[in-house]
Image (cartoon, rainbow, N blue to C red):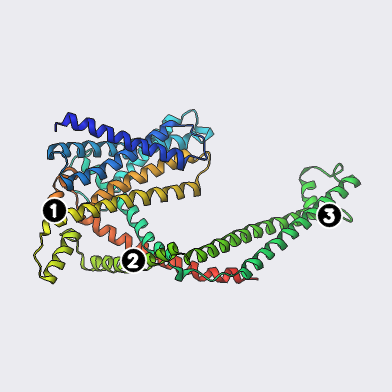
Amino acid sequence: MSIHSTLRVQRKKVILFFGFGWLFFMRQLFKDYEVRQYVVQVIFSVTFAFSCTMFELIIFEILGVLNSSSRYFHWKMNLCVILLILVFMVPFYIGYFIVSNIQLLHKQRLLFSCLLWLTFMYFFWKLGDPFPILSPKHGILSIEQLISRVGVIGVTLMALLSGFGAVNCPYTYMSYFLRNVTDTDILALERRLLQTMDMIISKKKRMAVTRRTMFQRGDVQNKPSGLWGMLKSVTASAPGSENLTLIQQEVDALEELSRQLFLETADLYATKERIEYSKTFKGKYFNFLGYFFSIYCVWKIFMATINIVLDRVGKTDPVTRGIEITVNYLGIQFDVKFWSQHISFILVGIIIVTSIRGLLITLTKFFYAISSSKSSNVIVLLLAQIMGMYFVSSVLLIRMSMPPEYRTIITEVLGELQFNFYHRWFDVIFLVSALSSILFLYLAHKQAPEKHMAP
């Protein structure tokens, strides 16, 4: 198949991925917001499309789809486009929308957007100085220079998310970590909430009565003006009335307490629902998965520690190595090369699907947690930046899961990167993230019962 015909096929697939990214943007991220800047939607969808295309090319490498020259061309083109988006386009538009939200800089927003982008480029370039990520012979604007720095940021994000996910997944799925919640606990907390609401209503009634009394006596009309009047109104009260400032402070404190009690009540209801759900067949299935992932988490932490201490990186992909160990142990005749290809294809496919799904779910939760009508465009562009860097870094790490004969073109396109550094860096950040997550969840789990038992 010629390059022109493969370009037509690849263009259709990019359009398909672009359409999926567009639908995800409209149906998930922006379903509660009005789309005012279509350039944000286009950038997000294009980033998603070319990120998915990279994963598609990994599968093409394993299956041998297209000839090697066509695959090399598509890899080169895809990386150039995604790097152009991540390094030049997205950072510029992030700065542009940040400046647009500042009224004082609105007239000179293009100038200040360029200044913010130049600031980003300076720190982005300085990022490569402390890391042994690249051979010094490459040019300033080469693919190796850009992807090496994108890889550091992306691998760090991947390791942080992987470390937290490896700990949080068993903590979320396993019924062992569910604290015991009874109807009595919920009723007691609801009673405290109702009592607090009654106190708020009572104090607001007192404030209303006091204001009406002051108005009838003429205190409102005759209230002295100026700084002295303000101080006097705070420190003194009219005869037979109460200090409104002190009552208002009490109301504010009680309203804050009521918000906390409401959140705690909602948390107890959610925990009770999880307890009921854990008794169903699906809940028991996820409980089993929780035990499996807890074993995986311990094993991953142990292997990351060993890799860091011994300064080692695997030379053989895990599938081939696992098959070789099994065949040698059982002493059977087995075509390791043939089956490693098919099992690697399945494994890489699972990694790709779960990576895309997991990242999209995480991005959706993150967006709803911090977005607002003014900041939504900036946050979506930040998510597009994170998504692109995450997927580029996934290619660097998935490369090790592929048999050596399928890494050739990927290695040629990525250039003379220090691949071993990225794997060691992933292990270090993963270990820090996992141990920090264990400590955080332990403290949160320990303090939760004490908080609900407080009078």
- Could you tell me the amino acid type at mark 3? Ser
Using the image as rendered, state which of residue 151 and residue 243 is in the foreground: 151
The answer to which image quadrant residue 415 occupies is top left
- Asked whether residue 9 appears in the rendered view, the answer is yes
- Could you tell me the amino acid type at mark 1? Pro
For disc 3, the marked residue is: 237
Q: On screen, 26 above or below 152?
A: above
Using the image as rendered, state which of residue 344 and residue 306 is in the foreground: 344
Foreground mark, 3 or 2?
2
Residue 202, horizontal then vertical, whole percent: 78, 57
Is residue 298 rendered to the left or right of residue 336? right
Residue 368, horizontal then vertical, whole percent: 49, 47
Q: Residue at x 16, y 57 (%)?
A: 340
- Could you tell me the amino acid type at mark 2? Cys
Is residue 327 rendered to the left or right of residue 248? left
Q: Residue at x 24, y 47 (%)?
A: 148
Please identify the quadrant where the C terminus is shown.
Answer: bottom right
Please identify the quadrant where the N terminus is shown.
Answer: top left
For disc 1, the marked residue is: 404
For disc 2, the marked residue is: 297
Residue 251, horizontal then vertical, whole percent: 72, 56
Q: Secondary structure at mark 1?
A: helix
The answer to which image quadrant residue 79 occupies is top left
- Asked whether residue 172 appears in the rendered view, the answer is no
Q: Secondary structure at mark 2?
A: helix
Q: Earlier in the sequence, mark 1 or mark 3?
A: 3
Say whether marks 2 and 1 touch (CB < 8 Å): no
Q: On screen, 403 above or below 90?
A: below
Q: Residue at x 65, y 60 (%)?
A: 257
Residue 128, horizontal then vertical, whole percent: 27, 48
Q: Residue at x 72, y 58 (%)?
A: 197
Foreground mark, 1 or 3?
1
